[in-house]
């Protein structure tokens, strides 16, 4: 079994995709670092101070003013309302939610990468894991060996899990190294708040507790990894079902992008919350941002994703074992 | 190479799995420990050389109606920057539609008080929403009704001034009075009389405290009110804000010279 997994890892690495992904991540992180740097400078210039409390207070006031404007979208209003209460909570407890530093940048980056960027990167590796063997004809060679089919697929799946872990790892390392050059490498022990729950328009702070930033980051990365694995599993299933890699990519891409669009307009269509793609932003639950549909919680989203993942895995194995290969 | 990556991946995978477990533990099984509210009202004295301006109040201080978004605060700032080389820090805490009671509540917040404590000057507009209530008051201009809302307002105003003075005894507070935006509508005489009386009573309250200066704007808008009003016929437009800004900035030079 180990040999099989090793063999599959060898195939993935030979294709050089992992390095391309690392390169893309490096370029993007550099871009975002610069953007963030510009933003920080701009805020300091506008307010004439680097004091974060003044900046946060100003943000709160700006939000309050936006809330008081007429003709504001109901959806957006709710979002602002909750963010406002959260910012006020941070301010009241004298905690800076965005103290500069590489860990803070990484946190923001993970939160924004989790629903599109990271799944895309995963897709690049996973999409052709099985379909390329089918379209290239090598699948026959693979299946003529005296090894059970499910073992072959399992070895591919384990190799996929390893690659996903590696992608997340490279994301972490690169964003830390690159952003740290600008913002400094420290800030792991900053306190952050988590445990906000959202009830309608109110932010419930009963379970709020302090955790260090490194722990917070580890939690977010765990969630990001989980999301990546689920998306990877779905792509894996499609790769088994469809021979054409381009088609696999196309279907997954459409699903992911539709998720991003749906999240902005599904609030009135409640059963849409059972789609996997509106549940991808798991980190929002940790930070306490309003979910796209009322009543969605971390437990709910994780269960939905897990069900989709397990179903996809079952389908993939069932089809792969039963299918005629010719 | 492959082995290195594979081992790294296994270690990383373990890490992420641990993170996931931590999340589940932290979010679902964490005993509800109440967060200690350890607000440290620390003083920051390193920015003493700056001229600190804090603006509080309603939409007028916010600058609603000025398409450049500056409002009178912005024009005062522009003017001050030409007069002094001292770096100026402005904190605009005004919220649209705010009434005196809400301002009073806002002033109880820790952070707002910290800002106020550092202020050299405080700009403030309040009362427009108390009196006009978005134009609703025009339906009922009876003296009895006006007196009722006014007495509530004056009580809040007194509390606002008292709060500011207790937080910061030295800052000069410019309390900017009301103008009559309905100067050219029906009942102009009645509304003008109400605004005049309102301003007078407010100035009386301001006079109870040191360094609180009631700045009139009534006269600025008296003659050509429609030239200075935004299309909502209530807030000043750019020109209107410039007028208020000019008046205020001239006062600040005077007090600065007076101090020296």
Image (spheres, coloured by chain):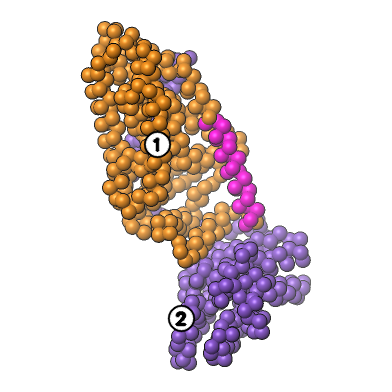
Query: Can you say which quadrant of the picture contains the C terminus of chain B?
Result: bottom right
> Which secondary structure, mark 2?
helix
- The residue indicated by pointer 1 is A254
Which residue is at a point 46% across and 15% down the rendered structure image? A14
Q: How many marks?
A: 2
Horizontal and vertical percent for residue A164?
Answer: 41, 27
* Quadrant position of residue A7: top left
Chain name for mark 2: B
- The residue indicated by pointer 2 is B136
Tell me where the magenta segment starts and ends, as one range. Answer: A25-47
In the rendered image of this protein, does residue B238 appear above or below residue A169? below
- A132 horizontally vs B160: left or right: left
The disc placed on residue B139 is none
Look at chain A in the picture and name its colour: orange
User: Mark 1–mark 2 contact, CB under 8 Å?
Assistant: no
Chain name for mark 1: A
Which residue is at a point 25% across and 22% down the rendered structure image? A319
Q: Nearer the viewer, residue B66 or A33?
A: B66
Mark 1 surroundings within 10 Å by alpha-carbon count, few (fewer than 14), some (14 through 19), many (20 or more): few
Which residue is at a point 54% across and 71% down the rendered structure image? B58
> Which secondary structure, mark 1?
helix
Q: Is residue B163 visible?
A: yes
Q: Is residue A135 magenta?
A: no
Which residue is at a point 66% across and 84% down the rendered structure image? B223
Q: Is residue A206 visible?
A: no
Horizontal and vertical percent for residue B127?
Answer: 53, 78
Q: Which chain is purple?
A: B
């Amino acid at each position: 079994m180990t040999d099989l997994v090793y063999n599959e890892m060898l195939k993935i690495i030979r294709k050089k995709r992992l390095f391309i992904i690392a390169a893309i991540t490096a370029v993007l992180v550099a871009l975002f670092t610069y953007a963030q740097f510009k933003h920080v400078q701009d805020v300091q210039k506008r307010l004439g101070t680097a004091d974060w409390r003044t900046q946060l207070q100003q943000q709160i006031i700006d939000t309050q003013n936006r809330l008081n404007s007429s003709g504001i979208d109901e959806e957006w209003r709710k979002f602002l309302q909750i963010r406002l209460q959260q910012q006020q909570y941070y301010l009241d407890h004298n905690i800076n939610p965005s103290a500069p530093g590489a860990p803070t940048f990484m946190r923001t980056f993970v939160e924004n990468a989790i629903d599109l960027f990271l799944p895309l990167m995963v897709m690049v590796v996973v999409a052709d894991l099985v379909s390329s063997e089918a379209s290239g004809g090598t699948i026959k060679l693979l299946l003529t060996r005296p090894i059970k089919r499910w073992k072959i697929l399992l070895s591919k799946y384990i190799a996929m899990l390893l690659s996903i872990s590696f992608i997340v790892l490279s994301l972490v390392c690169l964003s830390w190294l690159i952003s740290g050059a600008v913002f400094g490498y420290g800030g792991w022990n900053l306190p952050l708040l988590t445990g906000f729950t959202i009830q309608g328009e109110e932010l419930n702070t009963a379970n709020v507790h302090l955790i260090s930033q490194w722990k917070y980051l580890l939690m977010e990365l765990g969630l990001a990894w989980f999301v990546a694995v689920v998306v990877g599993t779905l792509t894996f299933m499609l790769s088994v079902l469809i021979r054409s890699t381009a088609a696999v990519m196309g279907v997954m891409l459409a699903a992911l992008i539709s998720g991003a669009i749906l999240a902005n307009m599904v609030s009135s269509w409640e059963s849409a919350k059972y789609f996997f793609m509106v549940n991808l932003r798991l980190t929002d639950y940790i930070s306490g941002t309003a979910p796209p549909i009322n009543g969605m919680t971390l437990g709910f989203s994780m269960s939905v994703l897990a069900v989709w993942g397990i179903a996809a895995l079952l389908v993939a194995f069932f089809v792969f074992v039963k299918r005629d290969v010719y | 190479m492959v082995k290195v990556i594979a081992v790294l991946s296994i270690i990383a995978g373990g890490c992420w799995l641990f993170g996931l477990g931590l999340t589940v533990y932290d979010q679902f099984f964490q005993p509800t420990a109440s967060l200690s509210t350890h607000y440290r009202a620390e003083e920051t004295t390193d920015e003493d050389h700056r001229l600190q301006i804090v603006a509080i109040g309603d939409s007028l201080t916010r600058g609603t109606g000025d398409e450049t978004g500056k409002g009178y605060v912005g024009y005062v700032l522009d003017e001050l920057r030409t007069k002094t080389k001292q770096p100026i820090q402005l904190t605009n805490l005004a919220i649209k539609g705010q009434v005196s009671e809400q301002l009073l509540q806002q002033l109880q917040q820790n952070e707002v008080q910290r800002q106020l404590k550092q202020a050299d000057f405080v700009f403030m507009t309040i009362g427009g929403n108390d009196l006009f209530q978005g134009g609703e008051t025009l339906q009922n201009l009876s003296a009895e009704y006006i007196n009722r809302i006014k007495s509530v307002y004056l009580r809040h105003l007194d509390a606002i001034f008292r709060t500011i003075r207790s937080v910061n005894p030295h800052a000069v507070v410019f309390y900017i009075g009301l103008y009559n935006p309905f100067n050219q509508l029906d009942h102009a005489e009645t509304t003008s009389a109400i605004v005049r009386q309102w301003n007078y009573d407010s100035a009386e309250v301001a006079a109870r405290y040191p360094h609180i200066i009631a700045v009139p704007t009534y006269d600025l808008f008296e003659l050509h009110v429609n030239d200075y009003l935004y299309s909502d016929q209530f807030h000043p437009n750019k020109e209107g804000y410039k007028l208020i800004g000019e008046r205020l900035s001239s006062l600040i030079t005077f007090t600065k010279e007076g101090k020296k």
